[in-house]
């Protein structure tokens, strides 16, 4: 299976990314999709992809709590210049638990809208973070889509899940499913053909206080297999197939 969401280029992780990648290879993962949130990370991500061609892929995005329009424009230029190399846009999104000021939320929505429009223009999947902002994310996707959307570690309710499914979104399930009722419920609302797995390295690990790593997607798989009562091999094949559907450019790399 492919880890669809790991922050390998985040400061503090990037320094030991080689070890995490080696371990993932040894443990039989098929690949890792790195996600980024800054201009510095975007540059490092392109290096990592060329170093581990065919195993590490990258999406490029921007901090959902950031407001530096010039940095956003620089990242968008890198995306345009490297659209054949990258497999998606992300992580981007809205986080109202971090951004509380109404004016700043407005800027967040403006930036997020630009990401949605870029994803549509370049026909790239968009990896979305949403916290306490689900209704606005749904509204903006409806208004500016359609786009291929991947909801990462989704925390919203069932009716929001249903609306996002109607919009064509996939849902990537993080290792916290081993200790989160909400994530198990989420997995049960999402049809099998829309499920993906992610490690969210270094966040959302299976044990509180311990960093996550790409090989933790194996724990996600076994927990999903148990919770959904589907044979683990069958489920692994389905999720791998979904990953290629959600990220079509993986197949051409
Ligand atoms: Zn993330």
Image: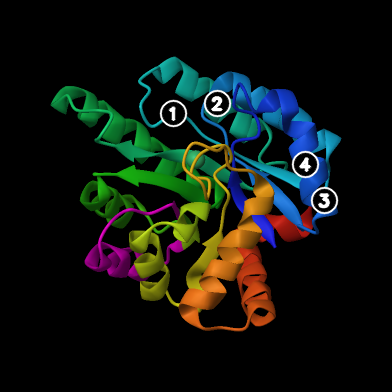
Label 1, residues with CA under 10 Å away: few <14, some 14-19, many ≥20:
many
Q: Which region shows up in magenta?
A: 151-170
Q: Residue 252's spot in the image, x, y percent?
A: 77, 57
Q: CA distance from mark 1 to mark 3?
A: 28 Å
Task: Report which residue position mark 2 lands on.
Answer: 75
Image check: 6 left or right of 142? Answer: right
- Viewer-proximal residue among 245 and 84: 245
Q: CA distance from mark 1 to mark 2?
A: 11 Å
Disc 1 designates what residue? 63
Q: CA distance from mark 3 to mark 4?
A: 6 Å
Mark found first going from the N terminus, 2 or 4: 4
Task: Answer left or right for 87 relative to 22.
Answer: left
Residue 169: in magenta span = yes
What SS does tag 2 mark?
helix
Q: Earlier in the sequence, mark 1 or mark 3?
A: 3
**Circle 4 is placed at which residue position?**
21
Q: Residue 25: give its label.
A: 3
| Residue at point 47%, 75% (across, down) | 227
Q: Would you say the residues marked 1 and 2 are in contact, meaning their CB atoms lie under 8 Å apart?
A: no
Q: Are marks 3 and 4 in contact (CB under 8 Å)?
A: yes
Residue 57: image x %, image y %?
A: 71, 45
Looking at the rendered image, the disc whose residue lies closer to the viewer, 1 or 2, is: 1
Q: Name the quadrant of the N terminus.
A: bottom right
Q: Are marks 2 and 3 in contact (CB under 8 Å)?
A: no
- The mark that comes first in sequence, 1 or 4, is 4
Q: Is residue 105 visible?
A: yes
Above or below, 153 relative to 22: below
Query: In the rendered structure, are the residues bearing label 1 and label 4 in contact, judged by CB atoms less than 8 Å apart?
Result: no
């Amino acid at each position: 299976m492919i880890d669809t969401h790991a922050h390998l280029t985040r400061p503090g992780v990037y320094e030991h990314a080689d070890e995490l990648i080696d371990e993932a290879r040894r443990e039989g993962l098929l690949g890792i999709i790195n996600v980024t949130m800054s201009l510095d990370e975007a540059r490092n991500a392109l290096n990592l992809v060329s170093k581990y061609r065919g195993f590490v892929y990258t999406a490029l995005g921007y901090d959902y709590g950031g407001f530096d329009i010039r940095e956003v424009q620089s990242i968008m230029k890198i995306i345009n210049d490297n659209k054949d190399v990258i497999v998606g846009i992300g992580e981007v999104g809205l986080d109202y638990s971090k951004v509380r000021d109404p004016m700043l939320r407005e800027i967040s929505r403006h930036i997020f809208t630009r990401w949605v429009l870029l994803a549509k223009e370049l026909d790239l999947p968009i990896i979305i973070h949403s916290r306490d902002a689900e209704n606005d994310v749904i509204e903006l996707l409806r208004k500016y889509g359609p786009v291929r959307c991947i909801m990462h570690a989704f925390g919203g309710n069932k009716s929001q899940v249903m609306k996002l499914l109607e919009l064509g979104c996939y849902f990537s399930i993080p290792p916290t499913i081993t200790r989160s009722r909400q994530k198990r419920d989420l997995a049960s609302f999402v049809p099998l053909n829309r499920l993906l797995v992610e490690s969210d390295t270094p966040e959302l690990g299976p044990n509180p206080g311990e960093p996550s790593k790409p090989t933790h997607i194996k724990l996600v798989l076994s927990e999903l297999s148990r919770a959904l009562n589907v044979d683990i091999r069958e489920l692994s094949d389905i999720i791998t197939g979904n990953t290629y559907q959600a990220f079509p450019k993986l197949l051409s790399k």
